[in-house]
């Protein structure tokens, strides 16, 4: 006859098993119901990588995922790389992303694309419009539950939104009726995830019409702002890399030169150089090597808004140039 | 703090865990603190009101007890009771009925050509005021009748009146049921906790999956009834019967379940009401704690059914009109109550005639088909009255009825290309199907309960994989099909407004 203690142990063991299974099912439900987007999927692919598979980690916002091609990096260096970047990511989130990534991988080198320091993406979740918030949300949702995720939430979300950040099911459960989302997610997790690339270059080329708009653009002398919190987290990131014995590089992806001529780029460049210098980092600004890289308007996306993401041709050139220099 | 808010999902586990963890002598203090926090989360100013009601009724009860012990004249005791009841009624009148009374007075005087300007009232109706004032009055009346002795421990009494699971929408507890439980120890019992959580889960299912889904359709039709046909208004009214049941029944199950987790047994508030075969049976099974309150403290003291038929009918109509008024300060609520009273009077008056008709026509009354017919007719009557309950005012209810009769829309409603025109009333068809599935499960469970089947016991006798399948099925039905989260306007429980 089992003792009373044994019976109690069995009962509570069952409760624990029930809870464990509940969380597994809950996670499965989130994966199936979550609106399909590249940010969330970039994380899911990252978690499927073999431990120690990543030698080079590229972090930052959309410029990071559109400028560097892991296949070219692999050909050039013989090393595997992964781009853990997301739309409008700023360095605060980048810091937490790297911290989370280090639980699973230990790269030798990390490349931080410098647009992540741009103050434009420095907002608290809940204070902006939903079309911006989803980017922050997808990044947080993509991360696995843990202390790093909780820390990232508390630093980037208003307290009233914490529960929504911790439990994505609160936001995505309504998709049960959206067969397309469920089907797409099912296909992704069962097949496509293994072929998923974290590299997403722009699919357009700048047209003559768009180019002409830049040619006639007025000069804007306003200085670029790098906020105190971005500076703080940039230093934290550099410190984290030092502690983990990882080499951190600061690389600025190129902007279209017609645009550069229309803004106070000297100010932006000076601030970046100072920051890199303060942490003794190798800093590479692609805008300084426009001709060396061989860039033309055709290497940029066809949009007149100052984003200047590279297309595949542009990314090939930039990847080769950057990794030649990093080596 | 709504039961269906993330705040409550954090609050409740902390309170329940704390309750089992802290030493016994602090347990009630802990629950009182939690209950006041729960109530103050709506508006901290409400605390003053509930504290006032608590102090007054506690002191009055002690005074009445003392009157008994000192063998004072009954007059003193009556005066004390009058003060206690007047306080509670006064609070209710001021906060809930002042605007209604003033408005009705002005309109009444206008009928005689008199124009009176009333000062503008802007009083916020405190959540749950009707529930705890009735609980306090019930307690005072029980002490007056010497059913119980006055509670000397203020903390215990304050907790009796403010116990958070039932504070804002009942069940309206009797001191005889809850007070002694507050003095007992409730050690942790895993089986009881499981049973309480299961009941809470069932309550959430009713509220989030069924009631809030129906609410979309009902709100749309009732808010813009002029653009809908009589058939669509009828459908919305039928669905409203289930919305209010799942909303209030769901709330009650969450309340009873939450209390059960901590070891308390609250009064059962519903017992398969839509399976009732007569309106009086419906009322014995609907909002049981309120119906029994009116029976014990209004209907019976008025004479009940002891003083002849017509007095009985008068008492029924008066009690149900008051019950209607309790629900809301509006003529539509009074008419709703009155209709329910009238149904019962009419049922009683026609009883013999119906029996003889059944005999002459050789109608069998001991078979399922007859009971089904009775249920359908009862539901039809009850549902017709719900239209008055749901409408914004008596005028709107009457206009809706007129509009329904003059715009039946039979052929568009049964159009084969569209499922009951549901897609034209905002609610997507997929949601309508989920709602029907939810209602099917609800009626199935209610049917089993009516037959006194031990659902929990039956479930407990199954293999673990089946039990877990049911538990996970319930949890994930709520999580996936429930209406909640930032995109939804968290629907408040209908009875909170009363």
Image: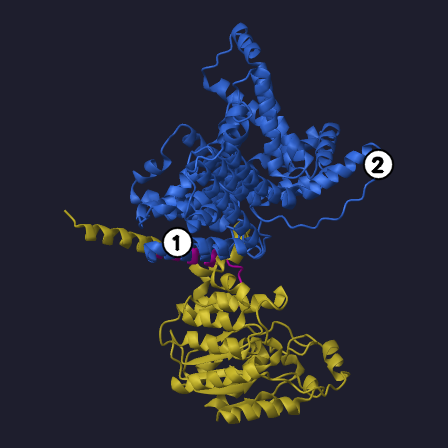
Chain colours: A yellow, B blue
Asked if residue A53 is positioned above or below residue A326 in the image, the reply reads above
Asked if residue A13 is positioned above or below residue B332 in the image, the reply reads below
Q: Quadrant of the C terminus of chain A?
A: bottom left
The residue positioned farthest toward the left in the image shown: A1
**Secondary structure character of the magenta stretch overall:** helix
| Residue B159: x %, y % from top left | 45, 49
Is B64 on the left-hand or right-hand side of B124? Answer: left
Q: Which residue is under mark 1? A: B16
Q: Residues within 10 Å of mark 1 (few under 14, many from 20)?
A: many
Q: Residues within 10 Å of mark 2 (few under 14, many from 20)?
A: few
Asked if residue B415 shows in the view, the reply is no
Residue nearest the observer in this picture, B122 or B268: B122
Q: Is residue A34 magenta?
A: yes
- How many circles with numbers are drawn on the protein? 2
Residue nearest the observer in this picture, B180 or B481: B180
In percent of the image, x 43 and y 83: which residue is there? A240
Q: Which residue is under mark 2? A: B114
Secondary structure beneath dot 1 equals helix
Chain designation of label 2: B
| Residue B369: x %, y % from top left | 49, 19
| Residue A312: x %, y % from top left | 57, 76
Secondary structure beneath dot 2 equals loop
How far apart marks 2 and 1 lie (CA) works out to 58 Å
In percent of the image, x 43 and y 77: which residue is there? A99
Residues drawn in magenta: A20-39
In percent of the image, x 35 and y 48: which residue is there? B193
The residue positioned farthest toward the top in the image shown: B360
């Amino acid at each position: 006859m089992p003792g009373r203690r044994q019976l109690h142990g069995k009962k509570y063991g069952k409760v624990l098993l029930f809870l464990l299974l509940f969380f597994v099912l809950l996670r499965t439900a989130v994966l199936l119901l979550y609106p399909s987007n590249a940010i969330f999927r970039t994380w899911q692919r990252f978690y499927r990588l073999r431990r120690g598979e990543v030698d080079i980690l590229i972090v930052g916002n959309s410029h990071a995922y559109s400028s560097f091609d892991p296949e070219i990096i692999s050909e050039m260096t013989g090393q595997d790389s992964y781009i853990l970047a997301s739309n409008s990511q700023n360095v605060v989130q980048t810091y937490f992303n790297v911290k989370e990534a280090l639980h699973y991988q230990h790269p030798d080198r990390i490349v931080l694309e410098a647009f992540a320091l741009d103050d434009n993406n420095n907002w608290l979740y809940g204070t902006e419009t939903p079309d911006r918030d989803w980017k922050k949300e997808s990044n947080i949702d993509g991360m696995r539950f843990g202390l790093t995720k909780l820390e990232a939430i508390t630093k980037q979300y208003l307290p009233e939104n914490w529960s929504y950040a911790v439990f994505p099911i609160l936001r995505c459960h309504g998709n049960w009726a959206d067969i397309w989302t469920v089907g797409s997610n099912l296909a992704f997790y069962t097949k496509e995830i293994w072929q998923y690339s974290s590299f997403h270059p722009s699919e357009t080329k700048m047209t003559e019409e768009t180019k002409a708009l830049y040619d006639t653009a007025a000069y804007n002398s306003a200085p670029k702002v790098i906020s105190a919190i971005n500076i703080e987290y940039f230093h934290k990131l550099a410190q984290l890399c030092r502690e983990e014995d990882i080499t951190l590089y600061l690389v600025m992806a190129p902007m279209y030169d017609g645009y550069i001529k229309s803004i106070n780029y000297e100010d932006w460049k000076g601030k970046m150089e100072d920051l890199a210098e303060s942490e003794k980092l190798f800093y590479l600004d692609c805008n300084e090597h426009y001709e060396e890289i061989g860039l033309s308007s055709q290497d940029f996306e066809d949009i007149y808004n100052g984003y200047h993401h590279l297309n595949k041709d542009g990314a090939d050139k930039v990847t080769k140039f950057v990794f030649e220099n990093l080596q | 703090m709504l039961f269906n808010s993330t705040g409550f999902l954090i609050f409740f586990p902390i309170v329940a865990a704390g309750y089992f963890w802290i030493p016994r002598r602090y347990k009630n203090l802990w629950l009182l603190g939690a209950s006041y926090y729960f109530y103050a989360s709506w508006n901290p100013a409400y605390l003053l009101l509930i504290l006032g009601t608590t102090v007054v009724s506690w002191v009055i009860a002690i005074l009445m007890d003392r009157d008994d012990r000192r063998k004072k004249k009954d007059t003193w005791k009556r005066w004390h009771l009058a003060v206690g009841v007047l306080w509670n009624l006064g609070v209710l009148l001021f906060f809930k009925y002042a605007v209604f009374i003033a408005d009705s007075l002005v309109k009444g005087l206008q009928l005689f050509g008199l124009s009176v300007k009333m000062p503008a009232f802007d009083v916020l109706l405190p959540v749950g005021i009707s529930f705890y004032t009735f609980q306090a009055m019930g307690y005072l009346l029980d002490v007056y009748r010497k059913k119980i002795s006055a509670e000397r421990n203020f903390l215990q009494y304050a907790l009796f009146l403010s116990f958070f699971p039932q504070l804002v929408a009942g069940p309206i507890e009797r001191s005889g049921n809850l007070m002694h439980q507050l003095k007992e120890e409730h050690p942790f019992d895993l089986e009881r906790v499981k049973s309480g959580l299961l009941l809470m889960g069932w309550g959430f299912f009713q509220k989030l999956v069924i009631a809030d889904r129906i609410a979309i359709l009902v709100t749309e039709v009732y808010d813009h009834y002029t653009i809908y046909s009589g058939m669509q208004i009828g459908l919305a009214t039928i669905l409203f019967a289930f919305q209010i049941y799942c909303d209030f029944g769901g709330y009650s199950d969450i309340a009873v379940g939450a209390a059960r987790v901590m070891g308390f047994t609250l009064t059962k508030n519903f017992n398969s009401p839509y399976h009732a075969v007569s309106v009086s049976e419906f009322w014995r099974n609907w909002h049981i704690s309120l119906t029994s309150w009116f029976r014990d403290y209004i209907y019976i003291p008025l004479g009940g059914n002891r003083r002849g038929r017509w007095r009985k009918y008068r008492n029924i109509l008066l009690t149900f009109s008051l019950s209607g008024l309790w629900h809301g300060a509006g003529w539509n609520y009074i008419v709703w109550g009155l209709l329910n009273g009238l149904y019962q009077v009419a049922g009683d008056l026609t009883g013999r005639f119906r029996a003889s008709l059944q005999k002459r026509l050789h109608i069998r009354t001991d078979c399922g088909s007859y009971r089904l017919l009775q249920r359908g007719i009862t539901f039809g009557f009850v549902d017709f009255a719900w239209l008055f309950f749901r409408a914004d005012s008596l005028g709107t209810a009457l206009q809706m009825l007129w509009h329904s009769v003059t715009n039946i829309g039979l052929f568009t409603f049964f159009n084969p290309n569209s499922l009951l025109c549901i897609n034209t009333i905002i609610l997507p068809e997929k949601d309508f199907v989920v709602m029907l599935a939810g209602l099917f499960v609800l009626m199935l469970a209610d049917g089993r309960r009516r037959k006194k089947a031990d659902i929990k016991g039956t479930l407990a006798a199954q293999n673990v994989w089946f039990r877990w399948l049911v538990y996970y099925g319930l949890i994930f039905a709520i999580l996936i099909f429930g209406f909640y989260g930032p995109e939804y306007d968290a629907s408040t429980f209908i009875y909170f407004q009363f």
